[in-house]
């Protein structure tokens, strides 16, 4: 109990900062480049070192002539996501199983990956009905594309968006506008 200047006893305790220096630093996600086919082992080593990490995998069925087997497929080869602070980031660079921390072109600093993107990736991998693939060749609105699956396979047109939930391929008809059809983004390829 504390007394203030008026002599009144207060039950409030004084503010005491009990966080250690390590706890006070903010943590963030970075992508670490590792040797091919060692992503899961690196994840296990980091876990043993009490370092939070995430190796994006997805279960898929592999079928042989005599059996089927579920396999954990690594979705992003040679990458392990690690949650670090400034001190742990420097320490991570010293481990022999880490080639480097991925960064933006022209930058020496590690690229920070927003928490929401990691959570969205986890959700997608846990709930997707089909294989998730990473494609860094993003399609741009207005690009010429061809439909590669479904009843419209072979149709060529221009990629348009009506709203964020619906991707559309449009066939431009001069003087009249465009004929559009909803398609899944995975069903189109760039021309």
Image (cartoon, rainbow, N blue to C red):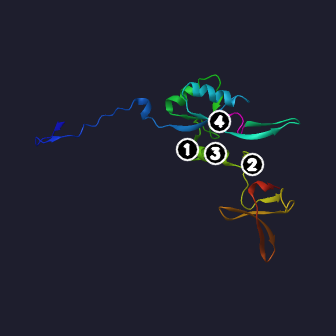
Element carrying mark 3: helix
Q: Confirm or deny contact between disc 1 and disc 2 (CB under 8 A).
A: no
The answer to whether residue 139 is left or right of residue 89 is: right
Q: Position of residue 168 (x, y in %)?
A: 74, 64
Q: Position of residue 158 (x, y in %)?
A: 78, 63
Q: Residues within 10 Å of mark 2 (few under 14, many from 20)?
A: few
Residue on which disc 4 sits: 55
Residue on which disc 3 sits: 121
Element carrying mark 4: loop
Q: Which mark is residue 115?
A: 1
- Residue 79 in the magenta stretch? The answer is yes
First of labels 2, 4 by sequence position: 4
Figure check: 40 above or below 149: above
Where does the N terminus fall, quadrant-wise? Answer: top left
Front residue (pair 9, 69): 69
Figure check: 9 above or below 157: above
Front residue (pair 32, 43): 43
**Rounded to the nearest whole Å, what is the CA distance between mark 3 and mark 1?**
10 Å
Element carrying mark 1: helix
**Rounded to the nearest whole Å, what is the CA distance between mark 1 and mark 2?**
24 Å
Figure check: 176 above or below 185: below
Element carrying mark 2: loop
Q: Which mark is residue 95?
A: none
Taking the spot 50% from the left edge, 29% from the top edge, the residue there is: 87
Please identify the quarter of the rendering in which residue 70 is found. top right
Where does the C terminus fall, quadrant-wise? Answer: bottom right
First of labels 1, 2 by sequence position: 1
**What's the magenta region?**
73-80
| Foreground label between 1 and 2 | 2
**Rounded to the nearest whole Å, what is the CA distance between mark 4 and mark 3?**
11 Å
**Rounded to the nearest whole Å, what is the CA distance between mark 1 and mark 4?**
15 Å
Q: Confirm or deny contact between disc 1 and disc 4 (CB under 8 A).
A: no
């Amino acid at each position: 109990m504390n007394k203030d200047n008026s002599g009144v006893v207060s039950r409030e305790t004084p503010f005491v900062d009990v966080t250690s220096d390590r706890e006070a630093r903010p943590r963030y996600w970075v992508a670490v480049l590792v040797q091919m086919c060692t992503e899961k082992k690196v994840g296990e080593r980091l876990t043993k070192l009490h370092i939070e990490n995430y190796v994006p995998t997805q279960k898929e069925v592999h079928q042989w002539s005599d059996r089927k087997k579920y396999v954990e497929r690594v979705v992003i080869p040679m990458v392990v996501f690690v949650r670090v602070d400034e001190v742990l980031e420097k320490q991570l660079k010293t481990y022999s199983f880490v080639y480097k921390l991925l960064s933006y072109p022209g930058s020496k600093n590690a690229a920070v990956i927003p928490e929401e993107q990691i959570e969205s990736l986890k959700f997608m991998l846990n709930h997707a009905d089909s294989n998730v693939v990473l494609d860094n060749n993003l399609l741009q609105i207005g690009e010429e594309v061809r439909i590669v699956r479904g009843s419209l396979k072979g149709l060529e047109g221009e990629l348009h968006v009506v709203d964020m939930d619906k991707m559309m391929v449009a066939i431009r008809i001069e003087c009249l506008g465009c004929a559009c059809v909803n398609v899944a983004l995975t069903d189109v390829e760039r021309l």
